[in-house]
Image (tube, helix red, strand yellow):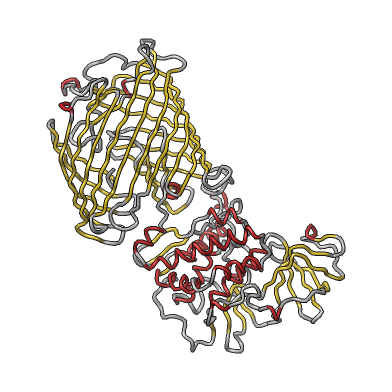
Amino acid sequence: MAMPLSAQDARRTAVIWHDRGDIAALDLVGGPGGKDREPGVDFTFLKESEGGTSPKFEVRDERGTTWKVKVGEEARSETAATRLLWAAGYVVDEDYFRPRIHVRGLPRLARGQEFVSAGDIVNGARLERDSGSQDSKIWDWYDNPFVGTREFNGLRVMMALVNNWDLKAINNAATGLTAGDGQYGISDLGATLGRTGNSLTRSKGVLKDYAESGFIDKVTPAYVDFSMHSRPFFVSLVNFRNYRFRTRMEGVVKRIPIADARWLGDQLGRLSPEQVRDCFRAAGFSSADVDAYAQIVTQRIAALKALSEGAAIAANAKDIPGDRCLASTCREVPLRETLTAIPLGTVYARALVGGFDQGAGIGGGVQLTSANAIPVVELRAAALTSTQRYQRFDLEAFMPNIGGGRNHADVWFSHLQRETDFFGIGPDTSLDLETQFAIVQRSYQGSLYRDVADHLQAGVYTQFMSADTSLGSSAIVTFPGVVSNAQIMSYGGFVAYDTRNNAIGLTSGLDLYARVASAGDIGHHDGLTSYGWLEKEFDARAYVPLGSHRTSLLLRSRAQFKTPADARHQIPFYDLSWLGERQYPRGYHSYRFRGNNVALFSTELQQTVFGITSVRGIDLFASADAGQVWDDDFLPRRWHSGLGGGLQYRHSRAIAARIEASRSRERVAVYASLSRGF
């Protein structure tokens, strides 16, 4: 569809787009037919139609004009959508909406009788003028004379703008071909202005669904992909022909040249706010819905127009925490983590990169998900491992919409098994004390959080965890509490402010995070002591462009304070604050120092040496880190520091391959990772 062919040629005998002239002067209340061709007021029933999903029948008005009446959920959405497409220059039917009409001789309808009231009054009727043309044929999105033209690509953008999820060829009509001046247009726009999705999640003319759906999905230097979900639930693979047919529809709004999408935005941008509202007034929406729909459409038009500027591309590339987590599985609590998701060709499965805090080497696995197949909740199951043979399994129920699109809930079970080095507790432990312990953690947790603003999120959580520890396979010495079992209940809250943007070049923006929590043992444990503590965590990160997106200074300050509840309670050794490894700070063994409290400062200067695309590139960087752990006394002489640098290849907005080395007073450490840094 995106072949770089010439634009629509005016000499062609068939057209798909018309120049409307002064768009700002168009009457969008009257629409394609105008007020002079509106339906009459006295209708006589002709016949009922059996085709399609919506109830339909034909009537004739007092002027002798035949009208196709449609009632139900498509009546309003189709009337509004036809006006938007017509204003943009496309061929649509002459549609009008009437809150109620009187139809003489109306029999009991086989479909739609619930829209008929006493006195043969039909409520909520869309009336489409019958053109009477017998010279009509169906045309296909992938096979027509306009594939690759600017005007055809603009029509594809319009399908995304109005969320038309029913892109079957049968809904497209070409008329007048015999006469030599054929008109290629859309003959059914009822499945619009709601949510795209499968048969369980999609909707028509539902403001809330339209407002919460995405628009621009992905931007590259040359093309833009729009959001469209029409793929059926994976169990429908038994009907492979329909599964493939519906899946292919998503491609209609993918890989559209940016110049063509921007052209369409410029066309619609000439409409006044009042004209946009007129589209929805003419469709019989309430005053509040008219304003809300018009605002969303105006925002989408602005996003199309902004595609001409790099900064605007970044702003419209869905870089707020809630949206980013649709592409990755992100959690702010109990531990802050991001597992980068990689598509596997189906919405029901994806590869994951990450999943372990540190010391695991390179980790990843596979996640299966119900995607949008089940209303309200998305079910997920993940299995992950790492090069150090860590193991993790998650079962999750994620609810993205709890009484509104800004409220979310997450409930999950996690099983984690790993072996970790232990050097003792305190800032001055010796390398000679290095040993290894194994831990198996089984936890149940839930969180409830809200997008307070576009970049601000806050929430609460609770967790129940059972932890079993033992000596590791390479343990040299033993230490108190290593063989134990504890059941810990914790709860708390968090606030996160995230303006990070990596749609173009190196990351820029701020990432601020704070969490407070209380934890204590319940049930049985090792019997030597009781566990209970309060904790506070603060993490501030800044990504500062230095003159351009090719140079950036990264700054990080992290602090964690854990205080035993009283003299009778302690903190399990594996839950203490810690330093050491690729980010905490670099140049030391993993979990090298442990204590109640930790402070960390990190910097990284990145410079792009070879830019491949707006996202991809090769960067050099230098790093400097310093931190310390302590229980009671914070002493300057206990700082541990490291200096280093490395090379990274940014493959996408989420994944980069990094190789780096850092020197501390104890050793030179070399790290390989799939990360864009902190």
- State the residue in front, 470 or 533: 533
Residue 31 horizontal side relative to residue 466, left or right: right
Q: x and y percent of residue 304 in the render? A: 45, 66
Q: Identify the residue shown where x is 61% and y is 54%.
A: 199
In the rendered view of the protein, which quadrant contains the N terminus?
bottom left
- State the residue in front, 545 or 392: 545
In the rendered view of the protein, which quadrant contains the C terminus?
top left
Total count of labels = 0
Q: x and y percent of residue 460 in the render? A: 47, 33
Q: Is residue 59 above or below residue 488?
A: below
Q: Is residue 310 above or below residue 418?
A: below
Residue 109 horizontal side relative to residue 429, left or right: right
Q: x and y percent of residue 351 in the render? A: 39, 46
In which quarter of the view is residue 515 placed? top left
Residue 167 horizontal side relative to residue 614, left or right: right
- State the residue in front, 229 or 155: 155
In which quarter of the view is residue 187 placed? bottom right
Q: Is residue 231 above or below residue 394?
A: below
In which quarter of the view is residue 401 placed? top right
Q: x and y percent of residue 360 in the render? A: 29, 34
Residue 304 horizontal side relative to residue 544, left or right: right
